[in-house]
Amino acid sequence: MATQGCPCGNYGNPNATCSCNQMQIQRYMSKISGPLLDRIDIHVEVPAVKYAELSSKKSGEPSSAVRARVEKAREIQRERFKARKGLFKNADMQSKEIREFCRADKAGEDLLKQAITKLGLSARAYDRILKVARTIADLSGSVDIMPEHIAEAIQYRSLDRQLYLEG
């Protein structure tokens, strides 16, 4: 799912000026229902890319390295769920499996509690954050879900944060 940040499409664009007032932006964003957002694991803002970045000769991480990391994470997940019928990856987990495989330490739980409380996130968002944190931990090769994995997963709930801050 993709959406603009406002009716004119320039909200947050560093290369253009938004012509919408705050009320128009709030009304526009309120068309996205909370229950719909709860069902999306990851939502992030993708700002417009400046020409200097597009034309840069710098290269990022090679696709082959990303692919290898993803394949290793998928293997970790297959091994984790091999005795579970119908479970193959973290996204397949239901509440029971989330409680079993996505335990956070005290610091991680405190971080989650703060995010849920301050952002007014739902129980469904809580579960989604834990599943995404589990995947981030798998991608980094970590057996445990660390607070930094939870923090990163929370960052992938940008529309929840945006609606909270502007709503």
Image (cartoon, rainbow, N blue to C red):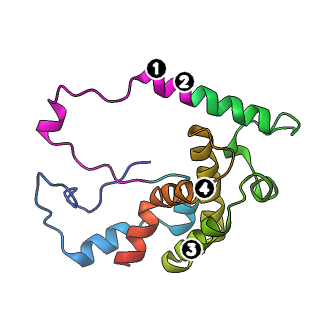
Disc nearest the viewer among 4 and 2: 4
Question: Callout 2, which amino acid?
Answer: Ala
Q: Residues within 10 Å of mark 3 (few under 14, many from 20)?
A: some
Q: Relative to 92, is 126 above or below?
A: below
Are dots 2 and 1 in contact, CB under 8 Å?
Answer: yes
Q: What's the residue at 82%, 57% (across, down)?
A: 96
Q: Residues within 10 Å of mark 2 (few under 14, many from 20)?
A: few
Question: Callout 3, which amino acid?
Answer: Ile
Residue 39 vs residue 19: left or right? right
Are dots 4 and 2 in contact, CB under 8 Å?
Answer: no
Depth check: give the residue in front, 8 or 155.
155
- Return the x and y of residue 88 as percentages of the image width and height: 75, 35
Which comes sooner in the sequence, label 3 or label 1?
Answer: 1
Residue 42 vs residue 61: left or right? right
Residue at label 1? 64
- Label 2: state its secondary structure: helix
Q: Which residues are magenta?
A: 44-69
- Return the x and y of residue 162 as percentages of the image width and height: 38, 68
Disc nearest the viewer among 3 and 4: 4
Residue at label 3? 116
Are dots 3 and 1 in contact, CB under 8 Å?
Answer: no
Question: For residue 84: magenta?
Answer: no
- Label 3: state its secondary structure: helix
Which comes sooner in the sequence, label 3 or label 4?
Answer: 3
- Label 4: state its secondary structure: loop
Residue at label 4? 146
Q: CA distance from mark 4 to mark 2?
A: 22 Å
Question: Callout 1, which amino acid?
Answer: Ser
